[in-house]
Amino acid sequence: MSVLITNIKQLLQVHDHNVLILKGEAMKTLSVLENAYLYIEHDTIIEYGEMQYCEGIEAETIVDATGRIVLPSWCDSHTHIVYAGNRTSEFVDRINGLTYTEIAERGGGILNSAKLLQETSEEDLYDQSIQRLEELIRMGTCAFEIKTGYGLTVDAELKMLRVIKRIKQESLAKITPTLLAAHAIPEDYRDRKDAYIKLITEELIPKAAKLHISRYIDVFCEEGYFDIEDTEAILKAAAKYKMRPKIHVNQFNILGGVALGAKYNALSVDHLEELSDDDVKALKNTDTIPVALPGCSYFLSIPYTPARQLIDAGLPLAIATDYNPGSAPSGNMNFIVGAACVKLKLTPEEAINAATINGAYAMGISNMYGSITRGKKANVIITKPMNHYSEIPYAFAHNPVEQVVINGQLKDIKNPEEDFRI
C-alpha cells in the first residue's frame, strides 16, 4: 500500500537525519516544511519535500491536505490503559473534600482498582482496554507505553502482561509494555511490606521475565508506598533480567528517587511535580528523560511539574497522559499538549516536541517513531483545516485530528466502523 499526502500547509517535525531526542534550547525549535508533500509505502516514510518537487510520484491513495497540518502521531509514554471498571465514586469523594491519601487509607485508590481487576476475566479486561486504546487512536495517539500495576498479585500482574501482549499483537498501534511491579502494598501485606517486596523480587519479576513481554520495570517510589530502599531492591532484582527502569518519582514527596533512577540508568523518571535543584543536577549528563504528567496535576489539584526549570537547565522533557482510572482518567494527548502550554509554560513548539520525538524517546522507540524522517515508521496525524500548528494547544478541549496514518494505513477517524487492528 502507498499513500501520498499533498498540499500540506505545514509538515512538522521534519528531520533529514534521524533525531532521537531534543534537549534544552533545542526544544524551542520545531522543524516545519511549508506547502509540502509526504510519501509513504507500506509502513514506512519514504520521501517528503516541497510540493514543487512532488510531480511524478504515484500512489495507490492520494490525500489532498490543503489547509491542514501533518505531524507525527502522539507518543504517550506513560499510561495505565489496562484496568477494570472505573473509580467515579472516588472522584465524588475528592469533590467532597477527601484527599488522594485519605481515599487510599480507606481501601480506595489503587487497591480498589486491584480488587476489580482480580475479579475481571482476562477476556473482559482485554475488551475494556482495547476499546480505550482505539478511542485514543482516533485522537491521534498511535504509540503507547502500557503499565501493569493494578494486579498486586503474581497471577493478576501476569494476567495484565498477557493482555498487554495481546494488544501489542493485535493493534496497529506501537505498544511498549512495562511491569509496574510495585504500585501499592496489598491489604494482606500492609504490616509486612518486606514480604511483599520479596514476592516481587523472587517470584513476580522472574515469572514476568520468562514471558518475554516487558523490557521495563517501574516502581511507585513515594511516601506511604515504596521508599528508596524498597525501590532499589526491586531495580536490582529486575536488572538481573535486563529490565530497564521507568519509575514514578516525586509525585507528592522528594525521596531521592530521581538520583536513584539516574544511578540505575532509568529510561525515564515520571511525575516530578515536586523537584529540587539536586534532582536537576542528578539528571544532567545522563540518558534519563524526565516526563511530566499535567493531566494528573489537573485532576488531583496538585502542583504541576516545573517544566521550565528542567528545560532551561538544558534537559529534555517528554509529556504524557498518565491515563488511569484514579488520578488521570483521560488519555487525550491533545489536551496534554494544551495543558503543557497553559500550565507548564511550554511554547507550542516545546510541547509538540515533548509529545512526539521526546515521547518516543521515553518509550525507547525514537529510532523509528516520533519524527518525519525517511525510513521511520509511518504514524502521522492529518489535522482538520487550521492556519497554524499553534492552534492545536490553543483549542485544548477540541480534537484537531481528521485522519491518521497508523503503521502505514490511512484511517478515517470519523467512521465508527473503522478498524485499528492488524
Image (cartoon, grey):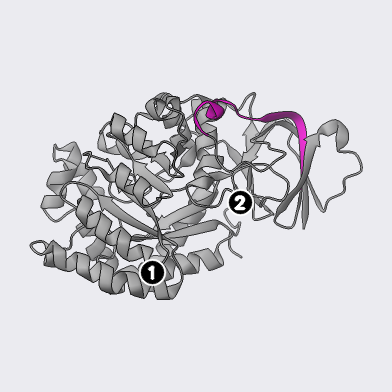
The type of residue carrying mark 1 is: Asp
Q: Which quarter of the rendering shows the C terminus?
A: bottom right
Instruction: Give the CA separation, mark 2 to mark 1.
Output: 25 Å
Q: Residues within 10 Å of mark 2 (few under 14, many from 20)?
A: few
**Magenta stretch?**
23-39
Magenta span has 268? no
> 248 or 411, which lies in front?
248
Name the quadrant of the N terminus.
bottom right
- 86 versus 66 height, above or below: below
Residue 400 occupies quadrant: top right
403 left or right of 363 in image = right
Q: Which mark is residue 415?
A: 2
Give x and y (percent) for residue 126: 42, 67
Tell me: 170 left or right of 191: right
Q: Residue at x 14, y 62 (%)?
A: 193
* Left or right of 174, for residue 378: right
| Residue placed under numbered mark 1 in the picture | 124
Q: Nearer the viewer, mark 2 or mark 1?
A: 1
Is residue 382 visible to us here? no
Q: Say which amino acid is labelled 2.
A: Asn
Q: Residue 40: which numbered mark, if any?
A: none
- Residue 358 % position (x, y): 52, 41
Q: Residue 379: in sight, yes or no?
A: yes
Q: Please report the residue visible at 79 percent of the width from the left and 36 percent of the height from the top.
A: 49
Q: Which is nearer the N-term, disc 2 or disc 1?
A: 1
Q: Is 31 covered by the magenta stretch?
A: yes
